[in-house]
Image (cartoon, grey):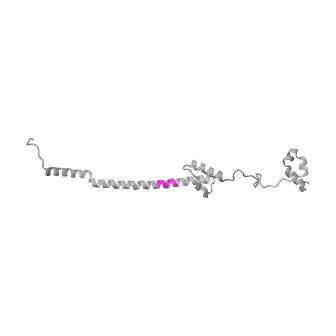
Amino acid sequence: MPDDEKKFTQADVDRIVSERLARDRETRGDPSVLIQTVSELRNQLAQATALNETLKSKVDTNDRNSILSKVGVELKVPPALTEFITGATEEEMRASATKLMSSIGPGPSLGGSTNPPDGNSAPKIYTAQELHSMSPDAINKDWANISAQLKAGQIK
């Protein structure tokens, strides 16, 4: 080794490294503080994410309830039965409500023997002149009514 080369003692190396680390800490900051800041930011992110999920759930619930109410009113579903409407979209809810209402509705027996399709109107009472002017087909069509009136003596 040539004599003009610098030789450092361990104390010199320690001092140089300490100075270099001190300069680095001044520009970048203390690593332990940075680690603590990163940890705090991660905690804040986790809290914000949890709050976001909670709010998103509430918004989804409110949106579903809003659509459910709208479909219920439009299809005249009784409020007590809206809890039976299923589906995630308005179309699915509308299909479910339609199916629900058709299954609980008056059904195909409307106008059956207990509720005549023409209502509870009294049968027509004929006069003798009306019977003479009626065609045989018209008499045959209402024969049950005409024969009952003849027996009761209502036709004059």
Quick one: which residue is furthest to the left in this view?
Answer: 3
Observer able to see residue 135: no
Q: Residue at x 14, y 50 (%)?
A: 10
Which corner quadrant holds the N terminus? Answer: top left
Observer able to see residue 97: yes
Which corner quadrant holds the C terminus? Answer: bottom right
Residue 68 in the image, given as x and y percentages of width and height: 57, 53
Answer whether residue 143 is magenta in the image: no
Residue 5 in the image, given as x and y percentages of width and height: 10, 43
**In front of the other: 16 or 74:** 16
Across the whole image, how many numbered discs are drawn on residues?
A: 0
Residue 79 in the image, given as x and y percentages of width and height: 61, 57
Residue 60 in the image, given as x and y percentages of width and height: 50, 53
Answer whether residue 59 is magenta in the image: yes
Q: Residue at x 58, y 56 (%)?
A: 83
- Main SS, magenta region, reads helix
Left or right: 45 in relation to 111? left
Magenta segment: 55-61
Left or right: 122 in relation to 94? right
Left or right: 12 in relation to 99? left
Q: Residue at x 39, y 54 (%)?
A: 46
**In front of the other: 119 or 130:** 119
Residue 39, located in which quarter of the rendered image? bottom left
